[in-house]
Amino acid sequence: MPPLSDQLRRRIDAVEERIRAACDRAGRPRSSVTLVAVTKTAPEPVLPLLPALGLTHLAESRPQQLWRRAPLAPASWHLVGHLQRNKVERTLPLVALIHSVDSDRLLRALEAEAAKQSRRADVLLEVKTTAEESKLGLSADEVRALVPGLEELQHVRVSGLMTMAPLEEPERCRESFAALRRLREELRSRIQGHDLVELSMGMSNDFEIAIEEGATLVRVGSALFEGLGDS
Ligand SMILES: *Cc1c(COP(=O)(O)O)cnc(C)c1O
């Protein structure tokens, strides 16, 4: 078995190749898409290697795992999974971006804690773009209802939207990604003080479609890390 960093290098090259091809098809510059490496399935010894291999945006989906792992790699860390309000205080100092704000209560908790810590909290609103009951996130109407209140936020900056596509139905991903993009366009002109530039959408199996539909952040986990180090 080749050393871990050779294996990783090849995984990263393959993902990079797919990103470039999708950008080419979409007529977008490669620099318009940020690869966020979701490390939840990566073995811990791999983490310190990542920045030198060019992965400078890393993410976890569970706050406790983020707390433990963020100190292992100097990178911009993102939280992509559900954040409970009692974990805001410890999470905030560690993250560059929280992709998964899914309630008004969480938004208020982030505003209060960011004020207390004298920092800015950069966040995305997680939007349910399919009817699946199990999915976390705000409905489009719930997002619209939040908009007037965003103007009062002093410390939280909403810089875009995030969605999870239907996992089992790849052909419906495009629909879901396009819906997120349309919602951003609709809201952009109505929100004062926040610049809705980011669209966080696309994972290992569907990030090319997401890039074609305008993703600025793709969250890739298993294509980079699954089974790494197994013989
Ligand atoms: C795990 C996870 C990802 C990465 O998914 P893969 O299919 O492993 O690429 C992306 N986003 C969120 C919210 C996740 O929890």
Image (cartoon, rainbow, N blue to C red):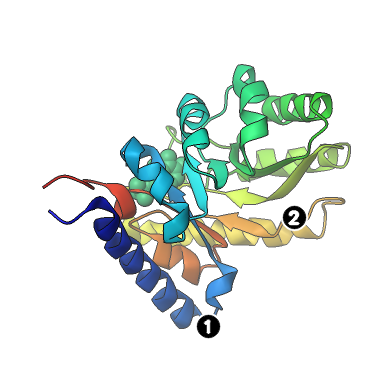
Question: What residue is shown at x 49% (from left), y 79% (from top)?
Answer: 26
Residue type (three-letter) at the residue carrying disc 2:
Leu
Badge number at residue 187: 2
Q: Nearer the viewer, residue 74 or 148?
A: 74
Can you give x and y, in whole percent of width and height, for residue 131 in the image? 46, 42
| Tag 1 near tag 2, CB within 8 Å | no
**Which residue is at 79% across, 27% downward?**
117
Q: Is residue 166 visible?
A: no
Query: What amino acid is found at the position of numbered circle 1 in the picture?
Result: Gly
Residue 188 drawn above or below residue 151: below
Helix, strand, or loop for circle 2? helix
Q: Which mark is residue 93?
A: none
Q: In this view, does 208 lie above or below 223?
A: below
Q: Earlier in the sequence, mark 1 or mark 2?
A: 1
Query: How many badges with numbers are in the image?
Result: 2
Answer with the quarter of the image where residue 182 lies. bottom right
For image coordinates 45% across by 28% down, the residue present is 65
Task: Give whichever of 48, 144 is nearer the camera.
Answer: 48
User: Residue at image x 42%, y 70%?
Assistant: 19
Q: Position of residue 61 (x, y in %)?
A: 46, 35
Q: Distance between the residues labelled 1 and 2?
A: 25 Å
| Helix, strand or loop under label 1 | loop
In x, y percent, where is residue 48? 42, 44
Q: In which quarter of the image is ligand 1?
A: top left
> Label 2: how many residues lie within 10 Å, few (<14), some (14-19) or many (20+)?
some
> Which residue has dot 1 on it?
27
Q: Position of residue 40 (x, y in %)?
A: 38, 38
- Observer-nearest of 169 and 25: 25
User: Counting other residues with Cα less than 10 Å from the Cα at mark 1, is it few (<14), some (14-19), or many (20 or more)?
Assistant: few
